[in-house]
Image (spheres, rainbow, N blue to C red):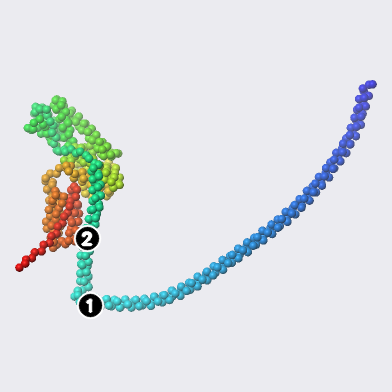
Amino acid sequence: MSPIPIIIAVLITIVISAPVTYIVTSAYQKKVVEAKIGSADEKARAIIDEAVKTAETKKRVSLLEVKEESIRTKNELDREIKERRAEIQRNERRIEQKESNLDKKLDAIEKREAGFAAKEEEINRQKEEVAKLNEERLQELERISGLTSEQAKEYLLKTVEDDVKLDTAKMIKEMETRAREEAGKKARDYVVTAIQKCAADHVAETSISVVQLPNDEMKGRIIGREGRNIRTLETLTGIDLIIDDTPEAVILSGFDPIRREVARIALEKLIVDGRIHPARIEEMVEKAQKEVENMIREEGETATLEAGIHGLHPELVRLLGRMKFRTSYGQNALKHSIEVAQLAGLLAAEIGIDARTAKRAGLLHDIGKSVDHEMEGSHIQIGVDICKKYKESAVIINAVEAHHGDVEPQSLVACLVQAADTISAARPGARRETLETYSNRLQQLEDITNNFKGVEKSFAIQAGREVRIMVVPEQVSDADMILLAREISKQIESQLQYPGQIKVNVIRESRVIDYAK
């Protein structure tokens, strides 16, 4: 059988079955869609119905909550209104009570004012009576006593003045005794502690220096031909050479200690060298000057280190070094300044003030002595000018200016420097005073005391450490003695310079003599 008719038959079958299949399929799908739409509508209506029911339920619930909230709010408002009304009523009752009390107080005050007015009238009347009686009493007292009121007042004032003077004298004596017992003990403790901690060696310098010679022939070489060598040495150094009969020694005399030291070193170098002629002398003097300058600088630095002072101006350090060659009553000025610095620092530490400032002031208190032989004025004024020049503090300047009592100390540091200076100068062996200076001080002490009214005679005893004063009993009472002793001590403090303290002893003696017949 041929395949073509089969293919054609298949194609025809497909062509015929395709529309039929489409129609059937379309009808089925339409039916399915319609069924789904119907089901969706039912579900939608069901959802809508459920939503409506839910909304109505929520609406009813909300209305109930709103009603409950409004009821609760109303209740709270009612309660608050009641409370406020109660509070207002209480306030009204308190106000009414206060008004009532005020009315009562006003009534009481009016009654008291009325009573006061009556009492005032009574007091005024009594005052008039008292004034009248007082006047009558005064007239009667004047008549009985034979004194006027002014005379009686003067007598009373005189009596009171004597009593007050006696009481004042007793009080001053008691206070001085108590202060002396307490302060003296503490001061002694401080001073003893400071002195124990401070120990310094002192050398004695004079206005001459002695140079030892190997033999007496060297004297001729020092003098030179027609005295050229000695003239050259004296001209270059400014020091006098004394060559006398003293065996194997040459004396250098001069008030400038630095120049004297330069001459001494130069002469010793010339003696060792053996070549003594003007050119060599000039060379050795120049070397000696450089050596002394180095020595001055080193001594100044050593002094600052020993005293524990830092930050000094280099020129101040050099001036301190120059003080090594300066003496006061045989006491070396540099060693004295170091000792004063150490004592002042120790005393400052004992009483709790700045020890560094006290040391600095103590080290610089005599700085004027380094150049006082070259400049006019006292070493105090020169020292003040030097400290101002090199920008030292006002405390240091005042301590330098006040350490001899020329001005009032303005700080505790100045007082400590005064005390330390006195301690250093007054200790045994520190200084050597001439007999003339000692006699003058005693005479000045007696002259001061003799100038006071009522002093019969006075005696300076114990090397000027005490003055005994005999007073006229008719002119000076027991109460006046205390005041007189105080005035004399103040006068001595203001006019004299002395180490340590001076005891003022006033003696009043009354003698009554009678004879039995």
Going by the numbered disc 1, the residue's amino acid type is Glu
Which residue lies under the disc numbered 2?
Answer: 170
In which quadrant will I find the C terminus?
bottom left
Q: Residue at x 83, y 42 (%)?
A: 36
In the displayed structure, 295 sits above or below 505; it is: above
Tell me where residue 166 sits by quadrant. Answer: bottom left
Which residue lies under the disc numbered 1?
Answer: 140
Q: Nearer the viewer, residue 427 or 337?
A: 427
Residue 200 is at least partly visible in this image:
yes
Q: In the current view of this chain or complex, which residue is farthest to the front?
A: 516
Looking at the rendered structure, the number of numbered marks drawn on it comes to 2
Q: Nearer the viewer, residue 361 or 189?
A: 189
Tell me where residue 359 sits by quadrant. Answer: top left
* Comparing labels 1 and 2, the label whose residue is closer to the camera: 2
CB of mark 1 within 8 Å of CB of mark 2?
no
- SS class, disc 1: helix
Local crowd size for mark 1, using a 10 Å CA cut-off: few (<14), some (14–19), many (≥20): few
Going by the numbered disc 2, the residue's amino acid type is Lys
Image coords of residue 316 (percent x, y): 25, 39
Image coords of residue 157 (percent x, y): 22, 67
Q: Nearer the viewer, residue 55 or 201?
A: 201
Q: In the current view of this chain or complex, which residue is farthest to the left?
A: 517
Residue 315 is at least partly visible in this image:
no
Image coords of residue 341 (percent x, y): 25, 42
In which quadrant will I find the N terminus?
top right
Mark number displayed over residue 208: none
Image coords of residue 32 (percent x, y): 85, 40
